[in-house]
Image: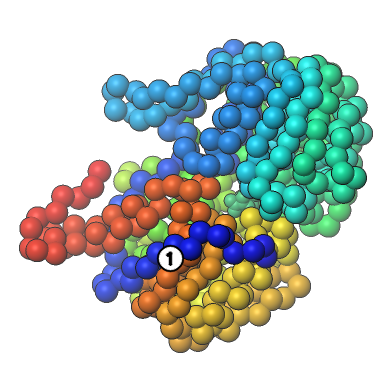
Amino acid sequence: MSAHSSSADFWPAPSASAPVDAAVAVPGSKSVTNRALVLAALAGGPGRLRRPLRSRDTLLMADAVRALGASVEEGTDSGGAGEFWDVAPAGLRGPATVDVGNAGTVMRFLPPLAALADGPVRFDGDPRSYERPLHGVIDALRALGARIEDDGRGRLPMTVHGRGSLPGGSVEIDASSSSQFVSALLLSAPRFDQGVEVRHTGGTLPSVPHIRMTVDMLRAAGVRVEAPEDGGEADVWRIAPGPLRGRDLVVEPDLSNAQPFLAAALVTGGRVTVRDWPERTTQPGDALRRIFTEMGGSCELGEQGLTFTGGGRIRGLDADLGDVGELTPGIAAVAALADSESVLRGVGHLRLHETDRLAALTKEINGLGGDVTETEDGLRIRPRPLHGGVFHTYDDHRLATAGAVLGLAVEGVEVENIATTGKTMPDFPRLWADMLGGRTAAHGAGPGGERVEERA
Ligand SMILES: O=C(O)C1=C[C@@H](OP(=O)(O)O)[C@@H](O)[C@H](O)C1
Ligand SMILES: C=C(OP(=O)(O)O)C(=O)O
C-alpha cells in the first residue's frame, strides 16, 4: 500500500434512501481501447476506434503511440454516434519518452513496441509504477533480442534501445504476477521477424480472460494465433509474423466499470440497466452476471442492455476470483454488506496492482467497523454493522468506486480523492449522481414533483 494521496479532498458518498432504478451508459473499455491503440500503431494502414475510453490510462497510451510516431486524432461523428479516434501508423521511431503514469497496460504493452523503434525510448511513470512488476517483459524482450537499460531490478524507469526490428522466437516467462506480461509480448509479436512462442512457466496465471481478449483482437487484425483455448498446449501461445490490418472498431462499454452501478442495484434492492452490454465479450466484467446473481439478485440481457435487479438480501460469496481480479474491490464492498461470510481467493497478485489492494481493502473496510482479514491469496470478509468515516483510496480508482458502493448503505462515508477514478472513468461522480437521480425518474416525478425524463 503506497502513501495516501496528497489530495486532501473528501467526497461525501451519497447514501441511497430508496432502491435505485436507473439506466446507465458506462464509458468504453480501458483494456479494449489500449489494445486497439497498440494494434493500430502496428498496423499496415489507418484505423478508427469508435467510442474509445477517454481517461488517464488511455490518454497516456495515445500519447505514447504518438511519441513513437503514430498519429492519433480525435473527432466526433456528426451523426451523433459519438467520439472516435483515428490512428495513422507510421515508422516507429526514437528517441522518445513514454510516461506510463500508473497504467499497467502502458508500462507492459509499450516496451515491445519500443523495441521495434529505431532509437532509444525512455520509460518513466508515477512512483507506484516503480514498484509494479515488469521483469516478465524486460527479461523476455532481452531473450528475444532487445537491448534494455534498467537499474538491474527489472522495474521502471528504464530505456529500451530500439533497433528498428526484433528477431523474436521462443521465450519462457513467469506471468503469475500479471497476465499483462503475456498480452504485451503477443500484441507486438506479429512484427517480430520470427513472431513469438510464449510459454508461461510459473504459478497460476491470473486474468486469463484478458489474454483471450488479446488473442481475439489480434485475430480480428488478421494475425494467426495458436492459443491454449483452441486445444493448443496449456500456457503456450504462438503468433505468426505478418502484417496487421488497420480496423474500424466500436469499443465495448467497460464492464468492470459497470460494476459499481450493478452493485448499487444489489446493495439497495433496486434495478440498474447497463446500456449496450455486449452479447459476447472477453471482458472479465461479464462474470458479474454470475457473481452478483450468486450474491443475491437476478439479471436479464435484453435490447436495452443488461438489467440487474437486487433481491433485497445479499449473500456472502466463496469464490476464486483469479480470472477476474480487477473485480475484487467492488465484490469486497458488496461482501462487507452481506448477511454471511465471504472468502475471496486466487487474488494474491492484487498486492501488486495500483496499490496493495488486499491491504487497502482490509484497512479501509475495517476503518468503517468491518471485519476483514487478509489471507495468503485473498480476503475473508465477515459482515458487521458499519459506520461512517473516511475511506482512503491510495490513488486507486477501484478503491474509490468500492467506497462509493459502501456509502450507498452506510451514512457518512467520505471517499478520499474521488478524482482518482479518472484513471479509467473520469465521469464517475456525475454518472453516480445521475444513477441516484434516476430513482426519481422511474417513479415518474422529481424531488419537487416535476416529471423527470428517463435518460437515453
Ligand atoms: O490486460 C489488461 O487489460 C488487464 C489485465 C489485468 O492485469 P493483471 O493480470 O496484472 O491483473 C487486469 O487486472 C487489468 O486491470 C487489465
Ligand atoms: C489492475 C488494474 O489496472 P492496470 O491496467 O493498471 O493493471 C485495474 O484497472 O484494476
x and y percentages locating residue 86 in the rendered image:
49, 20
Look at the image and tell me whether residue 233 can be seen.
no
Vertical placement of residue 425 versus 68, above or below: below
Examine the image and state in which quarter residue 267 appears.
bottom left
- Nearest the camera: 310 or 391? 391
Image spot of residue 128 (x, y percent): 69, 53
* Colour theme: rainbow
At a point 44% along the width and 47% down the height, the residue shown is 426
Residue at point 70%, 18% (across, down): 92
Residue 83 falls left or right of residue 422: left
Q: Residue at x 18, y 57 (%)?
A: 441
Q: Callout 1 environment at 10 Å: few (<14), some (14 to 19), or many (20+)?
A: some
Q: Residue at x 32, y 62 (%)?
A: 271
Expressed as whole percent of the image width and height from the top left, the position of residue 221 reads 62, 23
Is 362 in front, or is 47? Answer: 362
Q: Is residue 381 visible?
A: yes
For residue 36, above or below residue 444: above
**Count of all numbered marks drawn on residues in the image:** 1
Element class at badge 1:
strand
Please provide percent x and percent y for residue 134.
78, 45
Q: Quadrant of residue 214?
A: top right
**Side of 203 where 343 appears, left or right:** left
Label 1 C-beta lies within 8 Å of the nearest ligand 2 atom: no
On the image, numbered disc 1 is attached to which residue?
10
Label 1 amino acid?
Phe
> Which quadrant holds the C terminus?
top left
Q: Quadrant of the N terminus?
A: bottom right
Q: Is residue 201 left or right of residue 207?
A: right
